[in-house]
Amino acid sequence: PEMDAPPDEAETGGNIYFDGFAPKPVEKTEKGFSCLVHNVEGFSTFEAKRIIDTRCNTDMCEAKSYDLMIVSGAAPAFPGVACKPVDQQKHYILSVPVALQCSYPEARAAALEIVKQFSSSQRLIYSAGEFNYQVKAGYPKEENGILLAPSKAYADPAQAFNAGKELTK
């Protein structure tokens, strides 16, 4: 299907929109916010009384890691790499720390250096499809009338979901 063209500058007042499927930026109105979004059906505008932004950017973070899941006969120990047991089947998550500006290929290269140190009882099950971020303290917080509540600020998806339910009350 053919996608609608983005609105031109005359229609948007010069604002730039679209960061994934989230509005960026939004316009404050008397009733709350006017948001322009883009999805498979094209561009559309909606009104919102309140916005809770669950995205996470590196400005919100104090640390970043690239995670690997491995199976190992015993809990692995690699210098500077956090290890968390997943289950009783000897599965572990290794969190390889990387710089906040680190690219995905650079992170995979850093992880490969760890994999090269595996013993014969260790094997890689999978590597992460995205980075793991540690969010700075102080979230959720309101900024320009928008509640910033990055989902990465919570220990796991269930905790983030429950926090989101509380924030929408």
Image: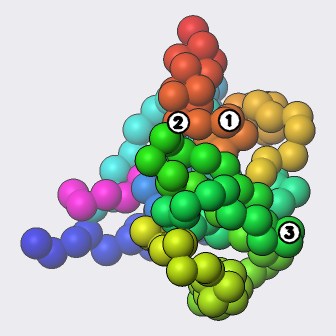
Disc 3/disc 2 C-alpha distance (Å): 25 Å
Is there CB contact under 8 Å for labels 2 and 1? yes
Q: Position of residue 136 (x, y in %)?
A: 86, 46
On the picture, is 152 further left or further right than 143?
left
- Magenta highlight range: 36-41
Number of the label disc, if any, that sits on residue 157: 2
Disc 3/disc 1 C-alpha distance (Å): 23 Å
Number of the label disc, if any, that sits on residue 80: 3
Q: Nearer the viewer, mark 3 or mark 2?
A: 3
Q: Nearer the viewer, mark 3 or mark 1?
A: 3
Q: In the image, is residue 86 part of the stretch drawn in magenta?
A: no
Disc 2/disc 1 C-alpha distance (Å): 7 Å
Q: Quadrant of residue 118?
A: bottom right
- Secondary structure of the residue carrying tag 2 is helix
- Secondary structure of the residue carrying tag 3 is loop
Q: In the image, is residue 39 part of the stretch drawn in magenta?
A: yes
Q: How is the image coloured?
A: rainbow
Number of the label disc, if any, that sits on residue 154: 1
Does residue 164 show up? no
> Looking at the picture, which amino acid does disc 2 mark?
Pro
* Nearer to me, 19 or 119: 119
Q: Position of residue 148 (x, y in %)?
A: 72, 38
* Nearer to me, 76 or 30: 76
Q: Quadrant of residue 164?
A: top right
> Looking at the picture, which amino acid does disc 3 mark?
Gly
Q: Position of residue 147 (x, y in %)?
A: 70, 32
Does residue 105 show up? yes
